Amino acid sequence: MSLTSAAVALRDSPRATLVAGTVASATIAVAVTRAGPIPGVVLPDGPLGLWRAADEGRPAWSVLAAVGITGLSLVFVRLYLLARDHVVDVRYVARTAVVWTAPMLLAQPILSLDAYSYVAQGQLLVMGIDPYVTGPIVFGAGPLLDPVAPVWRMTPAPYGPLSLSLLGWSADVTDADHVPFVFILRVLAIAAVVVATVAAARLARPDARAAAVALVAANPIVVLHLIGGVHLDVLVGALAPVVLLAVRKRWWWLAALLAAAAFAIKLPGLILVGYVLWARFRLAERRWAGTAQVLAVTAAATLAAAATVPDGWGWIATLDTPGHVEQLYNVPAAAAGVGYALVGLTVGGVDFAELLNVTQVLCAAAGAAMIGWLIVRGGDPSAPVRRTGALVGSAMVVLALAAPVIHAWYLAWALALLAACAGVVGHRWLIGLSVALCFTALPDPLTRWHHGLLPLTLLFLVVALALTFWWLADARTPATPRAGTRPASERVPARPV
């Protein structure tokens, strides 16, 4: 065997993929922890001191974290290709995802400080202080405020009442101790990922289930951000495919209840509410009476969720809170940058901040129009279930892209729907977006010019995306299944949805 053929065989080995992903995941967990937080933030030591940052050499640990993220992203692409080509089955993919996730279980909330904001906001609720009016700054310097990112210390909570109620309960039962609080949310995130994965497998074609499971459970967005970073967006992502299944079964009360719950967790759930109402209205049987019943269940569930916290509608006024972060890599900022360059080369005299305000409004308007169009098309009762799922999932992606700020975990809203329902081309774009978004949340030294490491970060991103799309475009004949796995064609398909 030549050196080249041996390298190809190793690259396409399921065992090598499992081991490489585990090494990359463990490397990320350790390196991100040792790289430490942004300046001005003091994190808790964590269990057995495992969350302590390094005393020196933090830039080097940051580079190692970037290497790990690049490696995990590329190994994820290889796992998807093995699943797509029926080299591995659903069980092998699920087992691989579990092993990749294991290093995150005891790690600090990685690549984001949001979990520490959750603790402070939950404690505000426990103390009878409205988190929709004030931020964690009221605690003053100390263990509750110190781990919170400075940009969020004076901002109110932008989450729905169910999210806030969950945070308040977690803070109450843990006495606002960061370690058990994080572990409660991580267990909840794992449960949500399991639900999303099972629902995605149920929606996907029988011969595409392994690929769908790989796209959900083994996705670095899930491993690093939803479980590693414990973000509440995972709850919306878990409810989305279940809502679609409930609509297809015509369990309208359940679909309405779950969609309203998703909306009461976070704003993207409103897309699910609109989809359920429109899908029921498009059904000719008892159109008006049936739609009125769905609307009544939705309204009752929404009101009940709002009643779980003292100021249940206060979050509507705080929805602009995430926009306080300045980003240059979201769609409105990119459009403003292009416009600023063009105007600067021609007439000049335009202020970038003013241009950014214009592009944000334009992107929001265009995004709203596109979301409405996708929901209208997705609500067609004659449309196949997977076409509907792809349309509703696309609407959620549009919401993430049109917003004034985007984070890696926003992809969670649509991940299960698109993994189960999108075609090959859709999967390629979903994987590319997953890989690209992994590089939007990195240790601090990698994201700032004065450290001299930002060009290295961009190089990692370019290499990861280039290899990703090269491999995905490789239309080779599907490989022979390895020992211990069964091709999808040999498995008994489930009943059609």
Image (tube, helix red, strand yellow):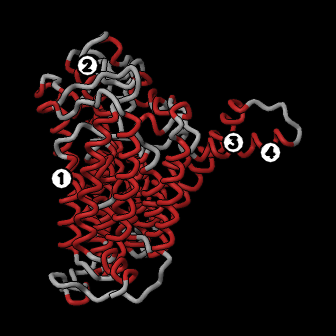
Residue in the image at 17% along x and 46% along y? 105
- Please say if the residues under marks 2 and 1 sit with CB atoms less than 8 Å apart: no
Q: Which residue is mark 2?
A: 144
Q: Which residue is mark 4?
A: 342
Residue 250 makes an appearance in the image:
no
Please report whichever mark, 2 or 3, sits nearer to the chain's N-terminal start. 2
- C-alpha gap between disc 3 and disc 4: 9 Å
Would residue 316 be found to the left or right of residue 346 on screen? Answer: left
Which amino acid does the dot numbered 4 rest on? Leu
Q: In terms of secondary structure, where does tag 1 sit?
A: helix
- C-alpha gap between disc 3 and disc 1: 41 Å
Which amino acid does the dot numbered 2 rest on? Leu
Q: Quadrant of residue 185?
A: top left
Which label sits on residue 337? Answer: 3
Which label sits on residue 102? Answer: 1
- Please say if the residues under marks 3 and 1 sit with CB atoms less than 8 Å apart: no
Residue in the image at 31% along x and 53% along y? 222
